[in-house]
Amino acid sequence: MINEYQTDTLTLPSPDETAKFGLLLGQTALPGDVICLDGDLGAGKTTLTQAIAKGLEVPDNPPVTSPSFAIFQEYQGRIPLYHFDFYRLFGPDDVSGLGLDEYFYLSGCAVIEWPRRAAGLLPAEYLCLELRVLAAEARQVFCRYHRQRWAARWRSLTEKFALSR
Ligand SMILES: Nc1ncnc2c1ncn2[C@@H]1O[C@H](COP(=O)(O)OP(=O)(O)O)[C@@H](O)[C@H]1O
Ligand SMILES: [Mg+2]
């Protein structure tokens, strides 16, 4: 059987490249998408979320910021953006206790920082991007995505990204 998931890696050599990549990702996002952003503090998860928001046509004001204290923020764009930051939660019981997992199944695009805290609650059809610091300005991205939902979009996204460089 073909694996349900595929993987890829990508380098984002500067914040500008992260902005370009996130913009393209936001532009291609569909209702019900779940995008997990894994990686340490300072890896660039919120920076990437801001670019995705731009691609979703979320207005600049109020700015998309780290919702660390709020845990969850919803923004209106071409489709809604549900931005989660589970850093302050211990695990899936907290996520479900707050009823936040219901948003993973609504018609916006969910972007989740610290997605491991929601282990077991995430829909199978996710895209996960793990950001790792390579250098002050450079990030490596390890991607894992649900083949059926994402493979075609991922291919066109990475092609467009390569052309934009
Ligand atoms: N290539 C890059 N992509 C994303 N952020 C970068 C990059 N290079 C440097 N940075 C910086 O790293 C920091 C990432 O912070 P942030 O996005 O808040 O991280 P996180 O949400 O993962 O904790 C920002 O100050 C950003 O400007
Ligand atoms: Mg953050």
Image (tube, rainbow, N blue to C red):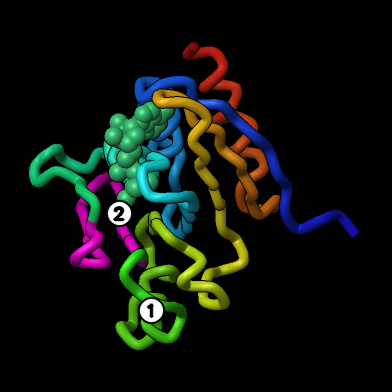
Secondary structure category for the residue under label 2: strand
The CA distance from mark 1 to mark 2 is 18 Å
Drawn side of residue 127 relative to residue 86, left or right: right
Residue 95: mark in rendering: 1
Whether residue 75 is in magenta: the answer is: yes
**Residue located at (63% from left, 50% from top):** 145
Q: Could you say which is closer to the camera, residue 3 or residue 66?
A: 66
**Residue located at (54% from left, 13% from top):** 163
Whether residue 35 is in magenta: the answer is: no
Secondary structure category for the residue under label 1: helix
Among the 4 quarters of the image, the one containing residue 72: bottom left
The residue stretch that appears in magenta:
67-86
Residue 81: mark in rendering: 2
Label 2 within 8 A of ligand 2 by Cβ? no
Q: Is residue 46 above or below residue 34?
A: above
Which residue is situated farthest in the right direction here? 1
Residue 53 x %, y %: 29, 42
**Residue located at (40% from left, 24% from top):** 137
**Residue located at (49% from left, 11% from top):** 165
